[in-house]
Image (cartoon, helix red, strand yellow):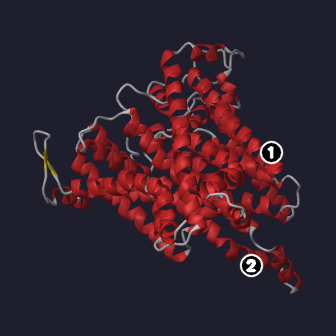
Amino acid sequence: MSGWSLIRLYTIAVYFFMFLPVGVVVLLSFNTSQFGSFPMEGLSLRWFIELWHNDAIVRAFRISLLLGALTAVISTVLGILAALALVRYRFPGKNTISTLLIAPILIPEVVLAVALLLFLRWLSLPRSFVLLLLGHVIFTLPFVLLVVQARLVAIKREYEEAALSLGAGPIQTFFTVTLPLLMPAVFAGMIFAFTISFDDITGTMFWKPGGVETVPTQIFAMLRNSISPEINALGTVMIVMTVAVPIAGMGVARWMAARRG
Amino acid sequence: MGETAGAARPWILLSPALGAIGFLLVVPVFFVIVYSFWLRSATGAEVPGFHLDNWQEVLSDPFYRDILLSTLRIAAITTLSCAVLGYVPAYFIATSRTRHKTLLLLLLILPFWISYIIRTMSWINILGVSGALNQLLVATGIISEPIQMLYNEATVILGLVHFLLPFMVLNVYVSLDAIDPNLADASRSLGASSMQTFREVTLPLSLPGLAAGGLLCFVLAAGTYITPLVLGGPRDAMFANLVFEAIITQLNWPLGSALSIVLLIILGGIVAVYNRLVGIGQIAKSFG
């Protein structure tokens, strides 16, 4: 066997490793049996219907969606502003600031979680949805910043200079020239922030107020008992959401980029 | 617009992000450091001041040392496994002449988007007593009774590798893709075999990507506490589990703070060494 076919075989094996467990989750979620395991008894949508009627899960979904959406909007706005400064201006201390802004990726999330929680405690404020939101913003900001920055570097400065020389103010220039060109990255950044927030469990376990569950912490709580077909069904819904949403988002971003040229 | 306004503009743009990082990260981390020197009295109240008791406990108790070492070991094995499992597919995608490169890469990065908790628990469906593997082995007569394969250190590592592999693939791919294909052609035309070309040209040029992927895998693995809770046994706690226990369960904030700082110093040290050797910018490349 040639070296190249070995490489191909190895690659196929890795794909298999990555997708097998995920495939099994999807498969088992259609199992008729009330145990979340093999052998399968038959196919049904029973567990998806149960999910729909499970108040705790529906509530967790609402909270996760709201949290993800707010996180995405806030961290994208902060990310765009910071990226503009870092790409378009020269100023002292730029490298340090840029490292500081991506620090939340490099600091273990547990430490980040403890730090924020401790600060809140020092201020004598209880755990709340706002804390959860702030935590998610800090945690997703670096990702948004990196995505927006990468795109901004590729947008020629000349376009902005042309607008400025034609008499547009800096703010007008941003909204009529820069932002439209930046839209694919803004979109990608928002999707990125949303998915990271929607999926986060490490920080969320520290920050969530008592009685509030997001989808991942709800799944974690359900796992305490045993793995049920309902968890697999929830997993399938999550897989569809976290995979289909980014892919649709990327499609839109690419379409926008193609249209703008 | 005057000169001063122009000079102030980047700071105006940066102020919301810097304010957020400052108030929600820098100041809070400072508080963690301060708290690690406080004491918790027998009544559960905190005693402010400069006490070294927590630090003495954390640094001298073999319980903490053992868990720290096993955490670093698990992170190292995970990183190495990700490198071994991730390099070849990244190489395959980067050097194959297929038109479907992007699709192949996308497919391998896709699991990154699939929920971490779902991917972690999905292994229970495979390795559990009534999981796919046991059912298969019993059905084929290889074993007569299902065996417990879950809830040990190996399954913790397996879960972590499954979670972190896309980070490795992406980083290695980015650095392999940036290599000028003419270099390999030149090496071959000078008489090097393809193995020699790989060893002397391609591999060294892809090291920054391997290092970036390795750093992410190591730091993320060493900071995890959900994977051992889901896939590990009672003795497979990792360092972050201690932090969670101390803060959320025992409400011992000073001890939890000291433990957090230990984790921060060790992983921060590794990031600093990496930054010195490779540069933090390498990680940003995979977002381009």
Quarter of the picture containing the N terminus of chain A is bottom right
Drawn side of residue B102 relative to residue A54, left or right: right
In percent of width and height, residue A181 lies at: 72, 53
Which mark is on residue A255? Answer: 1
Which mark is on residue B201? Answer: 2
Give the class, few, some or many, for how many residues have Cα within 10 Å of label 2's Cα (few <14, many ≥20).
some
In the image, what residue type sits under mark 2? Answer: Val
Label 2's element?
A: helix
Quarter of the picture containing the C terminus of chain A is bottom right
At 57% from the left and 30% from the top, the residue drawn is B146
At 36% from the left and 64% from the top, the residue drawn is B265
Residue B38 against residue A87 in the figure, above or below: above
Residue under mark 2: which chain is it in?
B
Residue closer to the observer: A37 or A67: A67
Label 1's element?
A: helix
**Extreme residue in the front direction:** A167
In percent of width and height, residue A155 lies at: 71, 62
In percent of width and height, residue B36 lies at: 23, 55
Residue closer to the observer: B135 or B234: B234
Residue under mark 1: which chain is it in?
A
| Residue A39 makes an appearance in the image | no
At 32% from the left and 58% from the top, the residue drawn is B261
Q: Nearer the viewer, mark 2 or mark 1?
A: 1
Residue B200 against residue B231 in the figure, above or below: below
| Residue A1 makes an appearance in the image | yes
In the figure, residue A191 lies in which quadrant? top right
In percent of width and height, residue B3 lies at: 51, 71
In the image, what residue type sits under mark 1? Answer: Trp
Give the spatial CA distance, label 2 vs label 1. 37 Å
